[in-house]
Amino acid sequence: MSTPDPDTTKPNRTRRTGLYVLGAVVLLGGIGYFLYWLLDARFYESTDDAYVNGDVVQITSEVPGTVLALHIDDTQTVKAGQPLLELDPADAQIAEANAEADLARAVRQVRGLFHQEDELRAQIEQRQQALRTAESDLKRRSDLLSDGAISGEELAHARDAVTTARAGLTASRDQLGQTTAQIEGTHIATHPQVLAAATAVRNAALALHRTGLIASVSGVVAKRSVQVGQRVAAGTPLLAVVPLDDVWIDANFKEGQLSRMRMGQPVTVHADVYGSGIDYHGHLAGIAAGSGNAFALLPAQNASGNWIKIVQRVPVRIVLDEKELKDHPLRVGLSANVRVDVRSSGPLPATPVRNTPQPKVDSLGGDPAVEARINDIIAQNAGRALTADLSSRP
């Protein structure tokens, strides 16, 4: 019986030992991963398909004009209420002066209507007296006609005088009715013509106010597309302000990861700009109503042609801690890694939830200076008759 060749047996033993070691490493790795999944990974859902998002507040001109001054530039931080740019106010100032003149004219016209009413009432009394006199003359002449003291022609003239007086009285009453219909239930300050003219003054003042554009929110200037001397039309986007203290994360999770996601679950975020050394903490604020493909301009039509299933991703909104955002600001569009703790349960949300309310657009409504100017114009053109009217206004 032949003995094994030592030169052949040694490599076989080495190969076998290597396979045992490799198998042991694979087994230990599998056990380690199983323990990791059992103790930690199964309680979390993560994705690196996540991006920083936020409001982009557009600054547009509500009136046409030429840009006279520009106080900001891209990347500059601005505060709410800070002036951004100025338009040429000349046209708006002329329009305001015309509106104030129209208000003064309207007050004087209405004032004339009130005086006309008094004049017509006096005229009616005068014509009533004239009618009574004519009727008395007619009666007296009718009695004299039977005695032959007057002619028939004179009696006819008396009848014509009564008819003329009665027609004049009727015309005066109609004129009084027309005038009364225009001013009934009002006084000078509350007459529709005066109110309409006052509204025009407010509109002109608002247009003048809008020639100076201010920041409605605090943030960073972006997308500036306007230059000094440029003529802009109403509604033209001039620049944008991004409030970086209120950004959020839009994470796109696979549809199979959504089954255990609920509103309010804690989330840990790492932004690529800071690396894994900076942790952001937040909570799941909402799950979008559909996948990104469902709201695409040209959604997929899977009912025709060859179909291949593609796993869809659904946007999930994550609200971050405000203090951490203040310490480490983020920019819109940056990439992030998101890890959601799915151990807590709750109802599946239908819509996302905002962290803060939308900014309020600036307006001039009820400016005390404008209202005082309107009252001054009315008082200056209404005469003494307005003193009691203005004191009775709320």
Image: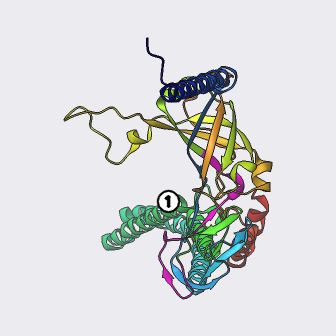
Q: Position of residue 361 (x, y in %)?
A: 63, 59
Q: Position of residue 30 (x, y in %)?
A: 59, 23
Which residue occupies the extreme front position in the image? 1
249 shown above or below 87? above
Q: Is residue 31 magenta?
A: no
| Element under disc 1 | helix
**Residue beneath the point at 68% across and 78% down:** 381
Q: Quadrant of residue 13?
A: top right
Range covered by the magenta-colored residues: 226-249
Q: Nearer the viewer, residue 294 or 255?
A: 255
Q: Report if residue 235 lies within the magenta region.
A: yes
Q: Is residue 366 above or below residue 247?
A: below
Task: Specify the farthest residue to the top.
Answer: 1
**Residue 66 placed where, x, y %?**
53, 84
Q: Indicate the quadrant where residue 184 lies.
A: bottom right
Depicted 383 relative to depicted 291: above or below = below
Where residue 70 appears, x then y in whole percent? 63, 82
Q: Which residue is mark 1?
A: 177
The quadrant the N terminus occupies is top left
* Rendered residue at 21%/34% (across/down): 306
| 383 sits to left or right of 227 | right
Q: Could you say which is closer to the camera, residue 170 or residue 391?
A: 391
Q: Residue at x 60, y 75 (%)?
A: 103
Does any portion of residue 122 appear in the rendered image?
no
- Horizontal side of 367 relative to 166 (left or right) equals right
- Up the image or down, 112 lies above or below 322; here it is below
